[in-house]
Image (tube, helix red, strand yellow):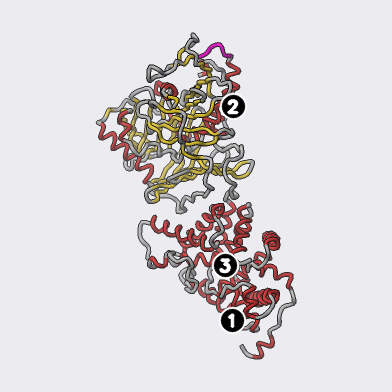
Amino acid sequence: MTMAQAHKWAPPQDATADAWLSALMDGELDDDEAGRAITRLGKDAGAMRIWSEYGLIGDALRGCVQDTASLDRRVKVALAAEPTVLAPLAKSHRQPVYWAAAAAVVAVISWTVVSMAPNNPGVPVAVNGAPNAPQMVEDERVRPTSAQDMAANEVAPYLAAHQDYAFTVAGAPDMNITPVSLSGDAR
Amino acid sequence: MKWLFCLLAIMATPVWAGSAIPDSEAVSWLRRMSDASRKLPYEGIFVMQMGDRMQTVQVENRPNGFANESRLVVLDGQPREVRCSRTESVTLAWGAKGQQMERRMGNRHFPDLLPENVAKLVGFYSLRLGKTIRVAGQDCQLIELTPKDRYRWGYRLCAEQYTGLPLKAVMVGDHDRPLLQYAFVKVRQGVTSRAAVAMPSMPSVEDLHPVENSPIAVRQLPPGYSQLAAVKRRLPNRDVEVEHWIFSDGLSHISMFVEPAPERMVSVKGQSARGLMNLLTRKLGNYQVTVVGDAPSPAVNFVAGNLDLR
Amino acid sequence: MSEQDIDRQLVERARQGDKRAFEMLVEKYQRRLLRLLSRMVKNAEEVEDIAQETFIKAYRALPNFRGDAAFYTWLYRIGVNTAKNYLAGRKKTMPTLSDQAMGDDDEPDERLVVQDLNTPETALMSKQIALAVNEAVDALPEELRSAITLREMEGLSYEEIAESMNCPIGTVRSRIFRAREAIAAKLRPMLGTSQDTRW
């Protein structure tokens, strides 16, 4: 650098207000300022361009210059398609995606109420195994509609949980829900 | 339209008695199919049909060392994607409420329906080789698995003749009625797109841990069934924590849920329209036990009837 | 505050759904990541694939980033593992550098300049840009040159630079900003000419 060149150089107009971006890059803003700066940067395309210029300058000084147009574009596109990050699972009562499938299966299930009383002269439900297995009989005294109402709500979570394991590709979520009568005729 | 007619024709494949084959040959067929579904890279589109409902799914499988990773994209209805790795699967959904992601317990899907230990199946299913049929434009060998007892449903599988990859699978119930069907509409074996299946990273699920000191003991399981898992978990959409046990014979799955019984507990039995799924709840001591499975009711009843209080 | 803190801030924002914040991190580290990966994989197209995958994996793994390590170190590990998996999955082996290049040390070697990634056109452009930046720095008055050099090449904080140059922190901040602006002013005409490339 010649003396002539050194004298020619003149500092840019004082723009310390704009130095926020430079300070942000170096991590020299406190948390609040930095938060505001990042927000501002996210909305200002011009500032983003300067952010990338400053980044380029630093990398160039460290000997690292690359053509990033293609990568930049691809990452932006891929990022846009990503689900927005991620609260931890299910302490909430949020319905899982596979819930819909279970609900749909519930709708086409016919229910019968079974009582466990061995003395009840109902229809035996076959249970195989050890001779001590309890006799399960269908209780014809229970009114069907109440069983259906109760069953639909109570059973769906079990179906959903079962399908969580057994069916990775869940059944169609937009199944029509149709009430089914309770007797064996519905089949 | 022609495509659709072909598809419907395939779905309506009649039962074929076929010829029984020696056990060793059966096992090697099953092993080929099981291996192909995991170790072969492939991509394609298949249709799943359950009752009156059909669903179209795009699938790609990428073997990765000892395991494989796969991605399924549901092409109808609400946009949904399932990504499976060796240890887990994650469902991503895009809906009215925005994007949702959740982990599932299972990570297997058509065509990977056969267990790794196929030898065990021969004890409970008899195998027959049927004729060659075309599925998705490719010649396949039809293989029937007929249950030897009434604790499981049967299967008809069509395996691509060179690689053994199952291109079609039909779960059959009583009187050979199809309960659930999968069939590739198109499939390319040996290639996948370049992009690896990137598994989303999710925070570890705090509400899923192994069952210890259960109040219930399983005295017996139906023949051929063994326990795959037992976890404590929260049921979807409910605040209660339950034990979730999973039993399987390699093809059919039965779940059992154990939780404290409510004050007024009513036992319920149920069956889905075509009988694919069966359910039974009962009380045992102070506990409610719910058994549900894609298995015939004798199997579900067997599980429910062979439990002891510890 | 330090560079680690700004990254932490950006990570926090990204975790709350601010994808722009993540894009800022991408912008900041993409060149370094590309250079790192190109030491492991020779094919430029594949390096870009792996880089993209690395960033997306990092985005998805944000909930697991504990902030006890530098973001770039964490990103670097993801990149190395992704590249390793990629290489392991390939049928034919590509020539790679020896294993010592594959991530046993935490701090990547910043001094290597990699030419492989660029096409002949962009390689020339890279060289020109690097040259222009260095010339611009040389043309700065000494106090601006010292400040920017200590910051970018030695990685000192403003406080450390203030101590080293025996001036207030505010002055350091101003000098670094003015240095960057002066260099950028010389660079902008070069960057503006080609619409298709971004550096």
Q: Earlier in the sequence, mark 1 or mark 3?
A: 1
Helix, strand, or loop for circle 3? loop
**Crowd band around label 2 with a 10 angstrom C-alpha radius: few (<14), some (14–19), many (20+):** few
Q: Quickly name the residue at label 3.
A: C197
- Point 63% across, 52% down: residue: C16
State the mark number for residue A153: 2
- At label 2, the amino acid type is Asn
Q: Quickly name the residue at label 1.
A: C135
Q: CA distance from mark 1 to mark 3?
A: 22 Å
Along the line of sight, the residue nearer the viewer: C110 or C136: C110
- At label 1, the amino acid type is Glu
Q: Chain of mark 2?
A: A
Along the line of sight, the residue nearer the viewer: C67 or B126: C67
Relative to B47, C142 lies left or right: right
Q: CA distance from mark 2 to mark 1?
A: 74 Å
Q: Residue C46, relative to residue C120: is it above or below?
A: above
Marks 3 and 1: in contact by CB < 8 Å?
Answer: no
Q: Tell me if residue C148 is in the magenta stretch.
A: no
Q: Quadrant of the C terminus of chain B?
A: top left
Q: Chain of mark 1?
A: C
State the mark number for residue C111: none
- Point 66% across, 90% down: residue: A4
Marks 1 and 2: in contact by CB < 8 Å?
Answer: no
- Point 45% across, 58% down: residue: C81
Q: Residue C191, relative to residue B230: is it above or below?
A: below
Helix, strand, or loop for circle 2? helix
